[in-house]
Structures are given as C-alpha cells and as structure tokens.
Image (tube, grey):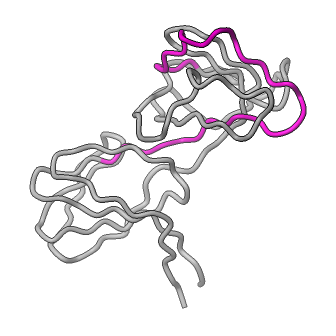
Amino acid sequence: MTVLNVISTNSITASATEYQVVSSGFYRVSATTATTVSFNDGPEIQVFANQPVLLKGGKPGRATIVKATDSATAVYTLGTNLGEISNTHPFSVGDFIAVEANGESPAVDSAFLSAGTAGKSITAATGTTITTDIDSSAAPADYTYAYSGAQALVKRCVKITAGAGANIIVEEVQVVGS
C-alpha cells in the first residue's frame, strides 16, 4: 500500500510567491477554489477546487562549503577540501538556494547565510564553485572550513507561485510503499 508522509505544510496567498528548501521534490497542492500553481517560473498547473493534485517539483540537492568569499555577490567553493578538481555540487545557474549553518567550527559568519525563504539564486557556476546574489560584503573576512567536523551547507530550493484565483496549500510529501 502506498502512503504519503507529509514533510511540511505551507499556505500561499493568491498571487504570492514562496521559496522553500527541497526535501523530497513531491508536492500535494490543494485549494478551496480553482486556481493555478507554478514551480520555478514554469508553466501554470491547474488546481481544481477541493481536488488535491500530486506534483513533482525540483530535485533535492546539497553540497558542503569549503570556502566563502565576502562580496556583494558571494562566491562559495563547494566540496570536502580545497583543490578538488571534480564536480563537487549538483547546482546550475538559476537554481534557488539556501545557505545554512550546520554546527561547523569555526562558525560561518551570518552574512554568508541565506534562509530558503529568501529567494536567493545562483548567477554563475563551475564544477567546484557557485556565484550567488547573496550580499556577504558585511562579513569581516572570507570563510574557510577548518577541515574537521561539520561543514556549512548549500541546499536547493523551489520557487512556488500561487495563481490569482485563490490561496493554495502546499504539502511537501514523501511517497512510501509500493
């Protein structure tokens, strides 16, 4: 028997946009009045009144931070250590992201962090770095991982936009069973 486990629930006002970290990438969307929903500026998907629809959104993605450069457009070097030459992250230009502390020591300065709800995105990417629209210029210095313990994280987010017709309820779900 297949079951849906609800991971998170969010209400989005008609015509509003919300960003959230992708956990499973599957969403159950419902509304009491017919409306639409779109993910990451994609096509509008019809949501009928009182008939939830199960949708696949963006894929989860995450990477660990090795170095962060303080500037108006923060640059993050991703991976497990400096000098890696293989691809160290699953991100592309235009992806929405969250940058989160993870109990690392030394702690990453808050100027480098960005909540998943902030709508920040990647403006350039190489195999090991991403440039973002996060303004980290208030950080006192660049951040470098100390090579022991936890590392700060970059996580993929999804942009969800409710249509003008009605408020929607978005539940990120996990599909369990066969």
Q: Is residue 25 above or below residue 42?
A: below
Residue at 44 percent of width and 47 percent of height: 20
Magenta stretch, main secondary structure class: loop
| Residue plotted at (36% across, 42% down) | 40
Please say whether residue 152 is one of the residues in the magenta stretch. yes
Q: In this rendering, is residue 11 above or below 101?
A: below
* Magenta residue span: 131-160
| Residue 65 percent coordinates (x, y) | 72, 29
Q: Where is residue 37 in the image (x, y as percent from the top left)?
A: 25, 54
Picture coordinates of residue 152, whole percent (x, y): 70, 34
165 versus 43 height, above or below: below
Position of the C terminus by quadrant? bottom right
Within the image, what quadrant is residue 52 found in?
A: bottom left
Return the residue found at the far right. Answer: 148
Residue 145 belongs to magenta span: yes
Question: Is 141 or 128 nearer to us in this picture?
Answer: 141
Q: In this view, does 163 lie to the left or right of 69?
A: left
